[in-house]
C-alpha cells in the first residue's frame, strides 16, 4: 500500500487524508482509516512523506521530495 500512496502523491500532488483514502479505495477496494494511518506513520518515520495538520480532523499528506 505504501508504494501506491507514493504513486498517488506523485501523480496528484499533496492531498488531504480523506482524499487519499478515497484514491486508495479505488485501487484496493475496502481500506480502513486505521490501515491508512498505520501506513502513513511508517512512511513518515521513514522520511518518505510529511503529514501536517490542516484543522481538527483533517491532515495534508505530501511527499518529502520529488523524483
Image: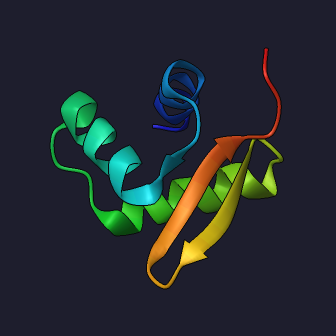
Q: Residue furthest top?
A: 67
Residue drawn at (79%, 14%), measured in percent from left and top?
Answer: 67
Task: Establish if 7 lies above or below 52.
Answer: above
Task: Establish if 35 lies above or below 20.
Answer: below
x and y percentages locating residue 32 in the rendered image: 27, 61
x and y percentages locating residue 22 in the rendered image: 26, 45
x and y percentages locating residue 50 in the rendered image: 73, 53
Q: Residue furthest bottom?
A: 56
x and y percentages locating residue 23 in the rendered image: 31, 37
Residue drawn at (49%, 26%), measured in percent from left and top?
Answer: 12
Residue drawn at (54%, 53%), measured in percent from left and top?
Answer: 39
Q: How many marks?
A: 0
* Colour logic: rainbow
Q: Is residue 52 left or right of residue 23?
A: right
Task: Establish if 19 lies above or below 11.
Answer: below
- Residue situated in front as seen by the camera: 58 or 35: 58
Q: Is residue 28 left or right of residue 17?
A: left
Task: Establish if 59 lies above or below 62.
Answer: below
Q: Quadrant of the N terminus?
A: top left
- Residue situated in front as seen by the camera: 21 or 16: 16
Residue drawn at (32%, 39%), measured in percent from left and top?
Answer: 24
Amino acid at each position: 500500500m505504501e508504494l501506491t500512496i507514493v504513486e498517488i502523491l506523485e501523480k496528484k500532488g499533496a492531498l488531504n487524508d480523506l482524499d487519499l483514502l478515497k484514491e486508495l479505495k479505488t485501487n484496493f477496494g475496502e481500506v480502513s482509516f486505521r490501515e491508512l494511518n498505520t501506513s502513513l506513520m511508517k512512511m513518515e518515520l521513514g522520511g518518505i512523506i510529511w503529514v501536517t495538520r490542516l484543522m481538527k480532523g483533517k491532515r495534508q499528506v505530501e511527499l518529502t521530495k520529488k523524483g
